[in-house]
Image (cartoon, rainbow, N blue to C red):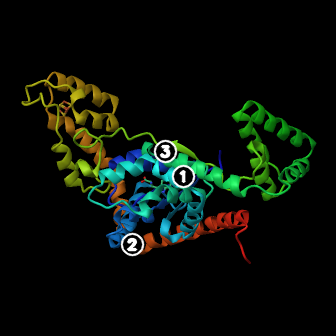
Amino acid sequence: MENERVVSGMRPTGKLHLGHYHGVLKNWIDMQHQYDCFFFIADWHALTTHYETPENIPDHVTQLMIDWLAAGISPNHATMFVQSDVPQHAELHLLLSMMTPLSWLERVPTYKDQKENLKERDLGTYGFLGYPLLQSADILIYKANQVPVGEDQVVHVEMTREVARRFNHFYGQEAGFEDTCEAAISKMGKKNAKMYRNLRRAYQEKGDTEAIEVAHALLESQQNITIGDRERLYGYLEGISKIILPEPDAKLTKASKLPGLDGRKMSKSYNNTIDMREEADSLTQKIKKMPTDPARMRLTDPGDPNKCPVWQFHQAYTDEKTHEWVKEGCTSAGIGCIQCKQPVIDSVQAELDPIRERAKQYENNHDYVKSIIHQGGEAARDIAAETMQDVIEAMRFSHT
Ligand code: TRP
Ligand code: SF4
C-alpha cells in the first residue's frame, strides 16, 4: 500500500561492509520509493552493550549516516534520524515497561544467547534485558506497519505485536464503546455501513483475514468519520477495544548472497569484509588474496568453482558470459585464478566508485551531514509527539 509506514534501525557499531550493503541497504533504497520510510540510528541500543565507552558512539553515528547517504538513502525520500534525538522513544519505552511482563523479555532468545556469548561484557543489566522493548517503542512510536529486519530480529517484532495488543487491550477500552462504534458506522452511509458490518462478521465468524484488509481500505476512504472514530472502527473489527498502537508486521530481509572473502558469512568478527568505502588499492589486494579452490595448487591443476568463494562473487557481480568463461577455464585449467578474479575486481570497483565518491563529499562536509540528522530528527519528533499524545490520552494519564 502506498502510504504504509516502514520503520527500521541500525546500531552504530562501526563501518558498514558489502554484506550490509547487499543485505540491508539495497532493500531500504528500494523501499524509500514505495513507502513512508523512517530509518534511524539506534544509538541508545548501542549503549546497552557498549555502556562503558559511550564516547565512541557519536563518531560512529556520523559515520553510519555517511554510509547510508553514500549508499543512496536519501533525505528527500526517507526520514533519516538518530534515536536519541527523539526522546519520545524513551518515554514510550518507560510507559510500556510498566505493563510488559518480565517473562516476555526473559524468554527472548537473543537475550540469553548474547548474554552468554558476549562473556567479556557484563550484560546482566536492566537496559540489556529491556533491549527488545526499547525496539518495540521505536516501532510503535511511529505506528509502523512494516519493519524490515533480518531473521534474528523477527522475534523482537513478534514481541512488539504482543506489547501493542496488550496496550490496546488495557487502554483501548472505553465506556459505551459499542454504542460509539455503531453511531460511527451509521455516519458512513447505508451502503458502506452494510459493507463494514458484513466484513466484520466475515472476520469474527470465519476468521477471514482478507475481509479485515478490505475493511481497512474501506475505513481509509471514509471522509465522514473522525480520526478517533476510524481508530475505534479498526479495533471494533477485531474485538471490543480501540487500536491506539497498531501491530506491525516483520518483513524478513533476504540474507545477502554475497559471502565474506573466505566464503563464510561476511562479518567483522571473521575479519573477511570489504568495507563499503574500501580504498581501491586495498580492495584489489583483498580480492587478489582471496582463497580459491585448494585443489588448484598450480596453474595446471584443474579446479571446481563450487569449491571456491570467488565463484560466489562472480555470481553476485558478473554476467552469464563471464560465468561460462570461469566454468570452462577453471575446470580445464585454462585460466589462472588471478585472471579469474580480474572481472570481479573490476565490477566491485565499479560498484564502489560512486559510493566512495559520495562518501568523500560527505566526509568533507560534516555540517551538511549534521543538518540532515537535525532535520530528520525534527520530522520524527513531530510524528512521535502525536503518538505520545494518543498514548497519554488513552491511558488518561494527563493531569492538565
Ligand atoms: N535491534 C536491531 C539490530 O540489532 C536494531 C534496531 C533497533 C531496530 N530498533 C529497531 C530494527 C527498530 C528495526 C526496528 O539490528
Ligand atoms: Fe576459483 Fe576462478 Fe581459481 Fe577456479 S579459476 S579456483 S573459480 S578463482
Determine whether, in the image, residue 69 is placed left or right of residue 228: left
Determine whether the residue tagged by mark 1 lies in a helix, strand or loop. Answer: helix
Residue plotted at (86% across, 55% down)? 176
In the displayed structure, 170 sits above or below 251; it is below
- For marks 3 and 2, the one nearer the N-term is 3
Q: Amino acid at mark 1?
A: Gln
The x, y position of residue 91, in whole percent, is: 57, 68
Q: Which residue position holds label 2?
A: 365
Which residue is more in the foreground, 256 or 247?
A: 247
Q: Amino acid at mark 2?
A: Asn
Classify 10 Å Cα crowding around label 1: few (below 14), some (14-19), many (20 and above).
many
Looking at the figure, which quarter contains the C terminus?
A: bottom right
The x, y position of residue 297, in whole percent, is: 8, 31
Q: Which residue position holds label 1?
A: 32
Determine whether, in the image, residue 291 is placed left or right of residue 209: left
Looking at the rendered structure, which numbered label has been put on residue 154? 3
Classify 10 Å Cα crowding around label 2: few (below 14), some (14-19), many (20 and above).
few
Residue plotted at (79% across, 38% down)? 200
The x, y position of residue 13, in whole percent, is: 35, 60
In the displayed structure, 191 sits above or below 38; it is above
Q: Amino acid at mark 3?
A: Val
Which residue is more in the foreground, 34 or 160?
A: 160
Residue 382, can we see it? yes
Determine whether the residue tagged by mark 3 lies in a helix, strand or loop. Answer: helix
Residue 66, can we see it? no
